[in-house]
Amino acid sequence: MRFHIVSDSSCDLGWERARQLGITLVSFYVAFEGEAYYREEQDIASRDFYEMMAQRPGEFPKTSMPTVEDYLRAFEEPIRSGLPVLCICLNGSFSGSVQGARNAREMLLEEYPQARIHVMDSQLATVLQGLLVEEAAVLRDRGFTLEEAVAALEPLRETGRIFFTTNDLEYLRHGGRIGKAAATTGTLLKVKPLIGYQHGGLISDGIAQGRKKSLQRVQELFYRYVERGNLDLSQWRVVTGFGLDREEYDQFTAQLFQGLAQRGHPLPSSPPYQIGVTIGVHTGPTPIGVGILRRAE
């Protein structure tokens, strides 16, 4: 190992997957109004918090970013062992997490002036950030130096794309993503939003009538994106993600992968992603979608 990898928990790898990959996660904090904060994935599993959300409709949890002290603890152990550190954080336009990591870096350099710490704004979120972190682990295990890995990873950030939908418009309204009138109209008409992520931000991919059609439409949008880009999926990481309902997710993923096979594409090998509550507080407990990110050369 030529460098150590740190990421904040919004990458949605989950604690066990991060441990398997040899990655240190720094937790976001999440809480319902007036209640104590949980450390994501440390104090409470994402599934358990989603169940709390499902049981408490009309209540909207909030998040708080990792502290500088959290990052100091994550950085200091590998630095003392003589390892450089690569820290990959949630899109800086969404959160101050990356700035907290940078502040921790500056503080540690005063005590360890020879330390090598690179803090990268992933410019990504949720599964895309996770895929970038996974790719960093591949480069680390192939013997790349910190500097070589950074150079290989930075161009990948612009290649990320997500297609997803969610069942409850109220969480999007509460987070300011859509207006109250749109949320009310959508609920009355049973319209579901099709949401995308590209070039560092959320975009609208349209709407669909009902949950079943919205999931079908997500798949169609993904297939069209692959075909229009003439993408060779052997050169890309593809992953599906979900919130609470694993059975619905399994059906969605099986259909998506069947469609890829029918189109002659290799089947993705990444394990499922459970979308963490850092993102879930904005989508509610019902997000389902697919993300894609190019592999390093």
Image (cartoon, grey):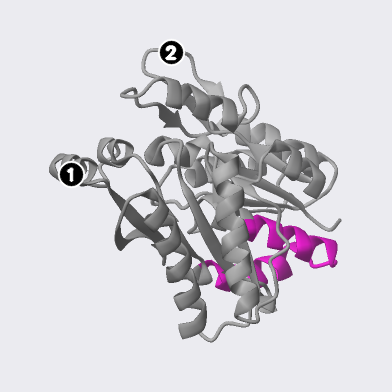
**Where residue 236 appears, x then y in whole percent?**
64, 73
Query: In the rendered image of this protein, does residue 287 appear above or below residue 148?
Result: above
Q: Which residue is mark 2?
A: 35
Residue 123, percent from left and from top: 48, 59
Q: Nearer the viewer, residue 161 or 57?
A: 57
Describe the element under mark 1 as helix, strand or loop: loop
The image's mark for residue 179 is: 1
Q: Chief secondary structure of the magenta span? A: helix
Instruction: Please indicate, yes or no, whether residue 262 appears anywhere in the rendered image.
Output: yes
- Furthest toward the left, the residue is 181
Q: Amino acid at mark 2?
A: Glu
Vertical placement of residue 218 versus 52, above or below: below
Query: Callout 2: 10 Å neighbours few (<14), some, many (20+)?
Result: few
Check if residue 89 falls in the magenta segment.
no
| Mark 2 or mark 1: whose residue is earlier in sequence | 2
Q: Quadrant of the N terminus?
A: bottom right
Q: Nearer the viewer, mark 2 or mark 1?
A: 1
Given residues 24 and 111, the one toward you in this image is: 24
Q: Is residue 148 magenta?
A: yes
State the residue at coordinates (66%, 56%). Answer: 133
Give, as a single range, the part of the protein colored magenta: 131-157
Question: What residue appears at the point 73 percent right and 62 percent down from the top-left corner?
Answer: 269
